[in-house]
Amino acid sequence: MSGAESGPEPVVEVADVDFGFGERPVLADVSLTVDPGAFLGLVGPNGSGKTTLVELLLGLRRPDTGTVTLFGEPAHEFDDGERVGYVAQHATAAAGRMPVTVREAVAMGRYPHRLVGRFSAADRRAIDDALDRVDVADLADRRVGNLSGGQRQRVFIARALAAEADLLVLDEPTVGVDAESRERFYDLLHELNDEGLTIVLIEHDIGVVTTHASEIACLNRELYFHGDPETFVETNALADAYGTNQAPVHHGH
Ligand code: ADP
């Protein structure tokens, strides 16, 4: 590749990936590139392999065939963990049992940056800034377990911001979050994305994700579509991926 033609290094590059759990094929021949600054919404029916794909791109699983790179390195060897913020599915429920305050939870994101195991003034500033940024500074001394689902999501984002993550991966982050909190949550994601944070998000609500994401990838074992949301809603990719008898609900936002 010549320097003039090659774009910026992809954040994630999934190439020709097959993956199965034992005999059960889950992903077949999936190739997908996530460029810096993308806001990618990953959609597909239940059991279509979305979480598995996310786990592959984070290096938590290895493909049977094909390759997955994260910031140019094989994903399973990637060890610069603070560059990636991951909010797993049901993370908010698990957080309900976390016996830590909001400030402590966000400070955890800063651990990899500490020198000699102690927080510097710069670390404390990064933690305060992250709390401010997602509007949870007034909750800093509250226990994470006593917060609403929407507030907890913000705490997880703040932790990724304190870590200075370049990629934020969210698996159905707004399940169980009320509509107003969900809108505020997406507003925050837009702001962070505008500032350069790359976002990959699994979202089951097609109306919401096509409104907010700048690209859509539609999966059902194979990748049915990857492109902009306008084209996605115009094509048959959705019906094809979901099976025509099982069309998903359109919310028409
Ligand atoms: P989605 O996130 O789209 O709902 P998943 O990636 O969670 O889909 O699951 C894809 C398929 O893999 C499903 O059929 C699911 O039952 C299966 N699966 C997921 N995790 C495991 C596992 N740890 N062991 C065996 N099968 C699994």
Image (tube, rainbow, N blue to C red):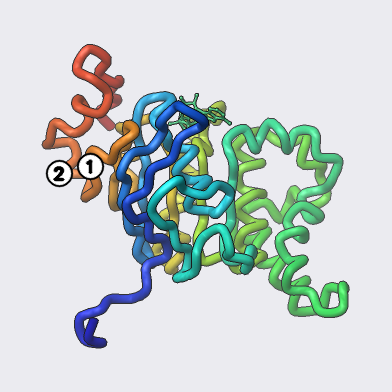
How many numbered discs?
Answer: 2
Q: Is residue 163 above or below residue 247?
A: below
Q: Residues within 10 Å of mark 2 (few under 14, many from 20)?
A: some
What residue is at 35 percent from the left and 36 percent from the top?
43
The residue to which callout 1 is attached is 225
Q: Residues within 10 Å of mark 1 (few under 14, many from 20)?
A: many
Q: Determine whether label 2 and label 1 are within 8 Å by CB.
A: yes
Q: Position of residue 56 (x, y in %)?
A: 49, 48
Say which amino acid is labelled 2.
Thr
CA distance separating discs 2 and 1: 9 Å
Q: Residue furthest top?
A: 245
The circle drawn on residue 5 is none
Q: Secondary structure at mark 1?
A: strand
Q: Is residue 123 above or below residue 172?
A: below
- Tell me if the residue at label 2 has its CB under 8 Å from ligand 1: no
Q: Is residue 89 visible?
A: yes
What residue is at 60 percent from the left and 68 percent from the top?
164
Towards the viewer: 73 or 64: 64
What residue is at 37 percent from the left and 41 percent from the top?
42
Q: Secondary structure at mark 2?
A: helix
Towards the viewer: 215 or 208: 215
Say which amino acid is labelled 1.
Phe
Q: Is residue 204 visible?
A: no
The residue to which callout 2 is attached is 231
